[in-house]
């Protein structure tokens, strides 16, 4: 049994401690924001926040994050009250197929939370450079993150 803190809730899951977090989130907790893309921590689709740091959940064993705060896309906001990044992605139509969107938003959430002295387009591009998107929405993604940054006063 492994006890985790996910989106502000304490949950117990009956899994091997070496199980990748993405499988626990999706299969045991029905949180489908994180996607299993490459399975090699290279595409970013599985990104979650662990104690506020963007973390690739496909290569994070659940036993290594006991006692830490895990936030998934579902934990950022709700359909009624979306996080500024979620609202900005919708407003800028920054998702095409949507597979990479989770990782882009979660990586951007870390950026906006840590860079309080102002965010530039270059900062956004650098922060998201390892999040793969084949649909070509990167200009819209950058606009969405910049919109959310302005809204949050970053």
Image (cartoon, rainbow, N blue to C red):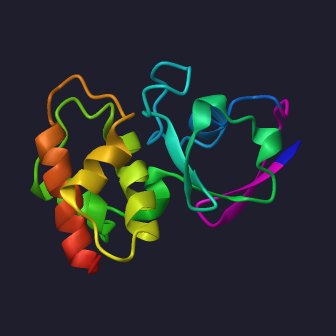
Q: Can residue 143 be seen from the camera position used here? A: yes
Specify the quadrant of the image occupied by residue 55: top right
Residue at left offset 33%, top offset 67%: 83
Q: Can residue 13 be seen from the camera position used here? A: no
Does 15 lie within the magenta span?
Answer: yes
Q: Is residue 22 above or below residue 49?
A: above
Magenta region: 3-17
Residue at left offset 11%, top offset 47%: 93
Q: Is residue 28 above or below residue 143?
A: above
Does 110 lie within the magenta span?
Answer: no
Residue 80 position within the rendered picture, expressed as x and y whole percent measured from the top left: 29, 69
Q: Is residue 138 above or below residue 19?
A: below
Q: Is residue 56 above or below residue 142?
A: above
Quarter holding the N terminus?
top right
The answer to whether 37 appears left or right of 40 in the picture is left
Residue 8 position within the rendered picture, expressed as x and y whole percent measured from the top left: 63, 67
Specify the quadrant of the image occupied by residue 104: top left
């Amino acid at each position: 049994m492994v006890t985790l803190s996910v989106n502000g809730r304490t949950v117990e899951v009956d899994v091997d401690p070496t199980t990748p977090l993405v499988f626990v989130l999706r299969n045991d907790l029905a949180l489908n924001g994180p996607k299993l893309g490459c399975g090699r921590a290279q595409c970013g689709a599985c990104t979650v926040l662990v104690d506020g740091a963007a973390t690739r959940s496909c290569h994070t064993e659940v036993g290594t994050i006991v006692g830490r705060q895990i936030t998934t896309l579902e934990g950022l906001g709700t359909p009624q009250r979306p996080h500024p990044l979620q609202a900005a992605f919708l407003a800028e139509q920054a998702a095409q197929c949507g597979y990479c969107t989770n990782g882009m938003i979660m990586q951007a959430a870390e950026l906006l939370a840590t860079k309080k002295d102002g965010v530039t387009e270059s900062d956004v591009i650098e922060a998201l450079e390892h999040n793969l998107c084949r649909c070509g929405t990167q200009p819209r993604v950058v606009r969405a993150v910049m919109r959310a940054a302005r809204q949050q006063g970053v």
